[in-house]
Amino acid sequence: MSKTSNAPDLLKLKAAFILGEGDRLHYILVSDVVHFNVTPPAEAVITIFVIRRASGLCEIVNESKTFSRNKCVSRYINANAGIIKNAIEIEIDKVRVKFTSAILKESGITLKWSILDLSNAKDVYVQFILIKEWGKADLLSIYPLELINLKRAERAERAEV
């Protein structure tokens, strides 16, 4: 007998990670756009999501996207999980320096970063509003189970009426 899973398929969702029940975003860092002198023209953006997991540990998810003609042509995702909260600032700096150094070495461009501090926003709804207002991060990269489950419950309640 085969088992079916209720777990979402991240590839179908295009999400970089799942924000589970009780998980919250801590920071989001987004690089300036890096333009490459290639034909056809291409550009890349790096987004770093810092997640406080319900377990108390943190995770850093890096998402690097390359665009050509306004279409995403490549995407790379990397995660570093199990980081203790006291070490998160050091780990964020390591990741930021790694990307900044690599881009500088390859292109001569010094990355600048925009940072959204969500550490004081405890509610996932508030976090999503702040991210949307900020306008620099792709909300499609985040799969919030808490919001999805609430939407399912709301639909079920409406169906009962």
Image (tube, helix red, strand yellow):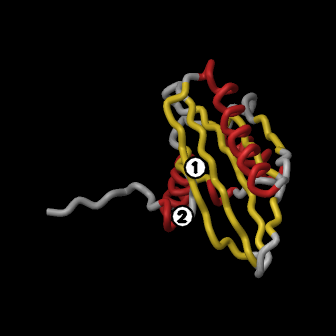
**Residue 150 in view, yes or no:** no
Dot 2 lies on which element?
helix
Q: The residue under label 1 is which amino acid type?
A: Pro
Look at mark 1 in the image and give the residue it sits on: 144
Separation (CA) of disc 2 from disc 1: 11 Å
Q: Residue at x 53, y 49 (%)?
A: 18
**Residue 16 in view, yes or no:** yes
73 relative position to 101: left or right: left
Q: The residue under label 2 is which amino acid type?
A: Leu
> Extreme left residue here?
1
Question: Of the residues tagged 2 and 1, which is closer to the observer?
Answer: 2
Q: Residue at x 71, y 48 (%)?
A: 102
Residue 127 higher or lower than 92, as above or below: below
- Where residue 114 appears, as percent x and y from the top left, is 84, 44
Q: Residue at x 61, y 52 (%)?
A: 142
Dot 1 lies on which element?
strand
Q: Residue at x 54, y 44 (%)?
A: 79
- Where residue 26 appears, as percent x and y from the top left, is 68, 34
Residue 123 higher or lower than 19, as above or below: above
28 relative position to 149: left or right: right
- Which residue is at the front of the view, 94 or 145? 94
Look at mark 2 in the image and give the residue it sits on: 13
Label 2: how many Cα within 10 Å (few below 14, some 14–19, many 20+): few
- Where residue 43 appears, as percent x and y from the top left, is 77, 67
Residue 140 higher or lower than 130, as above or below: below
- Which residue is at the front of the view, 141 or 30? 30
First-in-chain label (2 vs 1): 2
Label 1: how many Cα within 10 Å (few below 14, some 14–19, many 20+): many
